[in-house]
Amino acid sequence: MTKLSKAYTPREVEGPIYERWLAADVFAPDGAGSTADPDLPPFTIIQPPPNVTGSLHLGHAQRTAVEDLMIRHARMLGHPALFLPGLDHASIAAQFVLDGILAKEGESRQTLGRERYLERMRAFSDSTKPIILAQQRRVGASADWSRLRYTMDDVSARAVRAAFERLYRDGLAYRTEALINWCPGCRTSVSDLEVIPTPETGTLWFVRYHLIDESRSAPDPDATITVATTRPETILGDTAVAVHPEDERYRDLVGRRVRIPFVDRDVPIIADEVVDRTFGTGAVKITPAHDPDDYATGKRHGLPAPTILADDATIENTGTEFDGLDRYEARRQIVAALTERGDLASERVHEMIVGRCQRSNDVLEPRLKTQWFIRTEPLAAQALEATRTGRTRILPERFEKTWEHWLTNIRDWNVSRQLWWGHRIPAWYCPDGHVTVSADATGPTGCEVCGRPASELQQDADIFDTWFSSGLWPFSTLGWPDPTPDYQRYYPTSVMETAYDIIFFWVARMMMLGIQLTGTEPFHTVYLSGLIRDPEGAKMSKTKGNVIDPIGVIDETGADALRFALIHGAAPGQDQRFGTSKLENARNFANKLWNATRFVIGARPVSIPDGAERRLPDARHVGPLERWLASRAAATVAAVDSAMTDFAFGEVTRLLYDAIWSEFCDWGVEFAKVRLAEEAGSIEAREATWWSLVAALDTYLRLLHPVMPFVTEALWEALPHRASDPDLLIVARWPGAAEREPAIEAEVSAVIALVTELRNARASAKLAAGDWLETRVFVPIELGPTFEALRPAVERLARARPLERELTPEALHASAGPRDLSVVVGGTDIEARVRPAAPAAEAADLERARLERELAEAEGWLAAARDRLANDAFMSKAPPAVVEGARGRAAELADQVARLRDRLGR
RNA sequence: GGGCGAUUGGCUCAGUCGGUUAGAGCGCGCGGUUCACAUCCGCGAGGUCACUGGUUCGAAUCCAGUAUCGCCCACCA
């Protein structure tokens, strides 16, 4: 037993405790300090790796708290619990951040070149990694740091190469030219998921294209067809004009040709079903290289697809004066030029949706590129099967619909990125264009098609989408593709906890790749967290300036309070507003727990030596209070177990908050104070009371440990332990189920209600707080022993002394004076008399008014209860238990009404 | 255009396999310096559970529709 400081100061508590956990080596399931039962199945959580470039925000803190909660719970249950931490290199996000830093120094990706840029990135990420890891420790993550992984480490690199090679061999990775989303700012392609559809007000321009007079092979100055476009610059890439096959207006024009302005290209008018006759003029220009619809149309009609936009979104390859201009400048000039020519028929404001880059917010351009794709359909089918059969469960369940929809309509995944920071695609091309994919770290020995030596092969310059390596995370971290001991023991993992906003980016890809590559679902349960929002409900973001730094919060109120607050409001898939009041409440709770424990420790009877081994309360000396404490603790264990099973972590905190504060502290400790007083009872009885408090507190500390690990560890250390207990709570055992005593719980509840009613009466009668009441009470015989045992506590808590007991209700009534206060409790009948010195008359009037209100209320309920019992339909159709309950309720109300009437002299 | 979620006292949220009188924290009012805690203790006020209709003996809870707010998905120039 150690001494606790008077004031609760989380800062002084938390740091040293984390160090002790580390020193004791308790985080690793196979660590020196582990108490795991090797025969139990392992419980594994692979942490969603935070990006190296960002610092921890509240969302991370919440997720870490939830993951750590599950891990600590599993660990206390004796499972070998692996919480594997990691970091993500975050390819595009990291480059975006670094590019910003470089820009301030007047440098850029281009000026540095690939090698120096990557060096710079490594140095940068090396500087941020320790910060992020330290932040996680501050939150209290009991992660196995010896197994720390990084999506850019060698283990991950190996898995990436192996995964890609297998997918390639299985025909699930292929290289092709296709229309992709190009970000001119990031200078790379991005996947469909990274396109943010953004509503914008633009312009719809109507442009006249001149029909070709085939007799002269020249455009007809008077015969035109008008097309509508929002991107006039793409005119330079047009290779057709399309109309609907059944559009009467244009029927005669199909098959004729028009001249594309500026490039002076003569292109056909084609008929195609994609055209919406009602939009614009019903005629649409076709730019196959820069629009998805047009690309498909071009394919169907065998149209050429000239690319007219360079990587930086300037115009190129058109042979016009616009080459070299930025896309928007070109647009402006083209509109001007068309106006000048008289070919701009009209223009109008147009509401539209443009795709912007998730990272840079640039407007994306569809472009043709040769890229690697993952064939997703077969993979998605397997992922769907896993959730449909329940082998993997998604929480909350409603996300399964979203999941179904997305995976059913999935398109192939473009994994090539024209970036530098990431895993280079392990594909080599020989001068003849043959492709060789190799998982070998040193590359292939030669072209696998024609045998040319490695020296003549050129590796693909692109890297993988960062989510490709993330998609391998649950098994790459464990050593896959090798059958390592960790992989064999801890895979598949137990729970994947992450925020719902990356269900497609990440969860779906882990499922698809995991099942394909390892033959099994990578996790049994997907727990989707909600987002943390600011007090107004807005998403936290740096630009809005409403971001809360979790470390600042921890400095201020402690990691325990932060964790409690975050978990308290956590329901799967449900966003949570977060402000200071929740935090303060959590901090107050920690403080309450601290002080309650201090009280218990300080209340140790002198007959028990300091440092005594923990004993069970002596059964011969336990009374109702002691049995109540044990029973309520048992009830809480059961309720918490049930909530844990349901992943209802917010419910766990609510249960413990109520049990500890509203029951244990408010009543248990208060009753115990009296029982522990020197003058009350025997030494043995006092000891039994104290050991009961210790036992209940011990249970609560264990139950609360996964939520508030630091303070519970510190407090638990200060309590007496059993010889079989380990030194640290983190590796102590979760409380087992214990027997409850419903009768005792009910009896003590009645006594508690009695105290409450007495306080009630004195408050509404405006008695001075310090005044003692002379009180008489009738207590039913069966409640007698419990009442007698707690009588001194009742006297103290209600300031009612002497508290005299009458043997019958009649005697009680007979002894009451006309101006006495009266209290009516469910199963007891109590009267109280104010000491003569108090302003009895006024108090009695106030009290009488209170009783009148109470009577009116009770009569109302009674009438309702009787109506129900008089209802034949209810009596015949409601289940017997409900009818029985209603009967009991009515009887109780009738009794209460009778007693109230009696007291009011009616 | 499709899908999903939210709507409960001033604020933030619990609570739904339908079942006694819908709970908590914050805030608010009144009262408290008894040796765990003023980061506290006691007492209290405050809710037609968004609206309409339905199912049922019984609806915050189930069904249908409406409204407001929010999110996700979606190739229309």
Image (tube, rainbow, N blue to C red):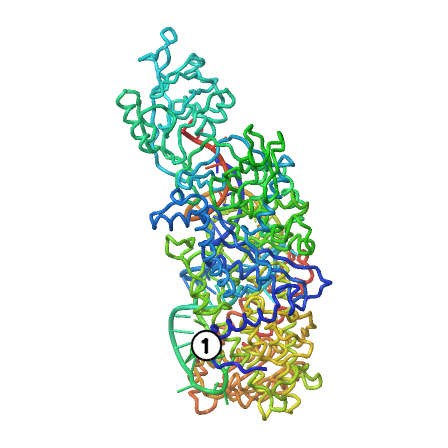
Return the residue nearer the eye: A521 or A393. A521
Name the kind of residue labelled 1 in the image: Ala
Return the residue nearer the eye: A71 or A906. A71
Viewer can see residue A211:
yes
Residue most extreme to the bottom: A679
Which image quarter holds the N terminus of chain A? bottom right
Question: In the rendering, at what x and y percent does residue A531 appear?
Answer: 48, 54
Return the residue nearer the eye: A759 or A627. A627
Residue A310 left/right relative to A25:
left
Return the residue nearer the eye: A582 or A867. A582
Q: Residue at 64% of width from left, 87% of height from top?
A: A687
Label 1 Cα crowd, 10 Å radius (few <14 / some 14-19 / many 20+): some
Question: In the rendering, at what x and y percent does residue A834 appear?
Answer: 48, 87
Q: Which residue is mark 1?
A: A849
Residue most extreme to the left: A340
The secondary structure type at the circle numbered 1 is: helix
Q: Residue at 38% of width from left, 43% of height from top?
A: A111
